[in-house]
Image (tube, rainbow, N blue to C red):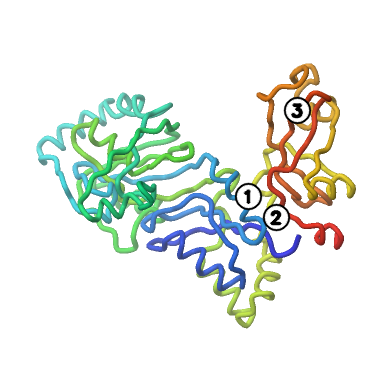
Amino acid sequence: MQDQGLIVVNKDLDLSSFAVVSRLRKILGLKRIGHAGTLDPFATGVLPVAFGRATGAIQFMQNYDKTYEVLAVLGTQTDSGDREGQVIAQAAPELLATVFADLQAGAMAEALADHQGQLNQVPPMYSALKYQGRPLYTYARAGQEVRREARQVQVQVQDWALFDRFAWPSFAARHAYLLRPDSSPLASYFFYAKVRVSKGTYIRAWIDDLGEALGIHAYCEGLCRVQCGPFSGENAPTTDQLFKVWRSCGQNAIASRARLKALGFILPLQAAFSDWPHWSLDAGQALALVQGKTLDISRESLAACLGVEPQDLPQGATADFSVQVVLTYQDDMLAMGQAMAGPQGFYLKSKRVFASHEDLSRA
C-alpha cells in the first residue's frame, strides 16, 4: 500500500483549493490527488488532501463536521457574502449605531439563538454547486439568479463577540489569521464567531442571513477553518513549507515524499477515521475482502467492534442494519467496509478498497 496517504494542509490566503492540489501534484510527483471540503480563496485553514488510492476515501471524509472562526463586518452587504464581492446594500450610520447598542445589550444573544441548531439554508449564488451542469457562480457572474432549494444544516455557535473599531487593534493582535496583512478598520462595527457546522453549510450565507435578521446587513471579512473532522490546523504545513521540503530534496518527488513522511506531514489513511469502528483482519481475510468476497462474523465480535452489547444488535436479517467499519491489515487501512445482517447472521463486505492483491503479497 505504497504512495498513498493524507496531508493536512494549512491553506494560505488567496489560494484556491484546486491550486493547493495542483502544487501538491508537483511536490509529490503524483497525479491522483484530491481534497475533502473546498475552501474559498479568501478563506484559510484546514484542508485535508488525499493522494494515491487514498483519494477513494474522500467520499467518506466529505461528511465531516467542520469548525470555523469568522469575522463579519456589520452594516454592509455584498453580492457574494464576502469581502471579494460588490457592495449592494448599506445600513444608515444612525441606524447601525442604534442597533449595535441593542445587540450589545442582549439582542445579539437572542438573534443567535434563532440562528443555530437545525436550520434551512439556501446555498449562495456564489458557490460551486452546479445547476444544469454549470457552477452557480457562473450564473452569478453573468447577473443571473437561479432558484435554489433550501437544505437542512446544523450550526452550533461555540463563541462570539461584538466589538467596534476602537477594539480593532486588540482583536487583530489575537486573530491575525483572519485578516489580510494590510487590513485596516474601515468599518465601524464587527462580529466574531466560532461555529461548528454540518456538511454543506455555507458560513457566508449564515452571516448574510444573520445580518438580514438584524436589519443591518453583514458580510464575511475573514474566515478560517480550524477543524475538519479529526484534523486541526495545529502543526499543519502551508504549501510554502511543503515547497521548501521539495526544494531541499533537490525537487525530487520520491525523496520529498520520504522526507514529508519523516516529518510527520504525510499521515496514514486511517488517521482520517480514528473515531470510526475498526476491524483487524488476518492475511486470509484481507485477501478475501480485496477479491470482493464477504466475511462471516459473530454477533459477539461485531458488538465488541461497535462498543455495544450483543443483544443490542438486530435479530435476523434486516436491510436497515448497515454500519461502516474501517478494515485494517497489519496496522494499515485496507478498505472501508460495511457490517450487515443477513439470513445466516452478520457479515462484512468491502465498500471501497485501498490495496491490491500485489500490495498484500508484498506485506
Residue 344, image x, y percentages:
83, 25
Residue 300, image x, y percentages:
85, 25
Quick one: label 3, few (<14), some, or many (20+) residues within 10 Å?
A: few
Quick one: label 1, few (<14), some, or many (20+) residues within 10 Å?
A: many
Q: Amino acid at mark 3?
A: Gly
Name the N-terminal-most of marks 3 and 1: 1
Q: Are the two marked residues, 3 and 1, in contact with CB atoms closer than 8 angstroms?
A: no
Q: Are the two marked residues, 2 and 3, in contact with CB atoms closer than 8 angstroms?
A: no
Q: Amino acid at mark 2?
A: Pro
Farthest bottom residue? Answer: 250
Q: Which residue is mark 2?
A: 268
Q: Is residue 259 left or right of residue 138?
A: right
Q: Amino acid at mark 1?
A: Ala
Q: Is residue 278 left or right of residue 251?
A: right
* Circle 1 SS class: helix
Name the N-terminal-most of marks 2 and 3: 2
Q: Is residue 352 left or right of residue 10?
A: right
Classify the position of the N terminus by image quarter.
Answer: bottom right
Whole-angstrom CA distance, mark 3 to mark 1, is 23 Å
**On screen, residue 152 above or below 167:** above
Q: Which residue is mark 3?
A: 307
* Circle 2 SS class: loop
Q: Quadrant of residue 351?
A: top right
Residue 198, image x, y percentages:
48, 36
Q: Which residue is mark 1?
A: 57
Whole-angstrom CA distance, mark 2 to mark 3, is 24 Å
